[in-house]
């Protein structure tokens, strides 16, 4: 048998037995990124959009390996980024709403007081802040 391989090097299989070709990357991570992207958009109202979106972005980037990004990883990356941005916007809106609810500040009156302060009437600002505190 050794004589056959030595005399005919084209027939020698250097890779050993037939090994199926696997494209680079991890399709499981790409699928997980897609699922987390969808969940980040769905759960963005609960405050989980930023967290799930961030994890989805990391998984989508890690899933590509050394090759090109899988189609589901591309969709997962986009949905995760959208969910993270939506989560940030909703969190900032909630923070502004809560701040406005707690202080019960009328921002139109505040702008009037600022205008009066710029015009030289400093007593108006003191009256405004004494009403809040």
Image (spheres, rainbow, N blue to C red):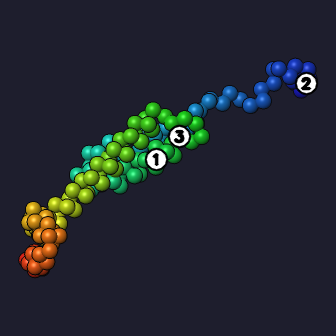
| Proximity of marks 3 and 1: CB atoms separated by less than 8 Å | no
| Proximity of marks 1 and 2: CB atoms separated by less than 8 Å | no
Residue lying farthest to the front in this orientation? 120
Tag 2 or tag 1, which sits nearer the N-term? 2
Label 2: element kind: helix
Label 1: element kind: helix
The reply to whether residue 118 is in sight is: yes
Residue 61 spot, x, y in % from top left:
49, 45
Q: On the image, numbered disc 2 is attached to which residue?
A: 6
Tag 1 or tag 3, which sits nearer the N-term? 1
* Foreground pick, 33 / 86: 86
- Bin the neighbour count of mark 2 within 10 Å (Cα to Cα): few under 14, some 14-19, many 20 and up: few
Q: Residue at x 51, y 46 (%)?
A: 62
Residue 64 - label: 3
The reply to whether residue 110 is in sight is: no
Residue 44 spot, x, y in % from top left:
26, 50
Q: Quadrant of the N terminus?
A: top right
Residue 102 spot, x, y in % from top left:
13, 69
Nearer the observer: mark 1 or 2; the answer is 1
Q: Left or right of 47: which side holds 22? A: right
Q: Quadrant of residue 98?
A: bottom left
Label 3: element kind: loop
Q: Residue at x 53, y 40 (%)?
A: 64
Q: On the image, numbered disc 1 is attached to which residue?
A: 59
Q: Quadrant of the C terminus?
A: bottom left
């Amino acid at each position: 048998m050794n004589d056959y391989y030595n005399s005919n090097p084209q027939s020698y299989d250097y890779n050993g037995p037939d090994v199926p070709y696997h494209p680079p990357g991890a399709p499981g991570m790409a699928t997980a990124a897609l699922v987390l992207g969808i969940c980040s958009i769905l759960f963005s109202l609960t405050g989980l959009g930023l967290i799930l979106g961030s994890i989805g972005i990391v998984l989508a980037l890690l899933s590509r390996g050394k090759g090109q990004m899988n189609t589901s990883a591309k969709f997962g990356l986009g949905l995760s980024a959208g969910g993270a941005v939506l989560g940030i916007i909703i969190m900032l809106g909630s923070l502004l709403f809560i701040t406005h609810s707690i202080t019960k500040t009328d921002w139109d009156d505040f702008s009037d007081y600022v205008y009066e302060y710029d015009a030289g009437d400093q007593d108006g600002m003191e009256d405004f802040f004494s009403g809040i505190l």
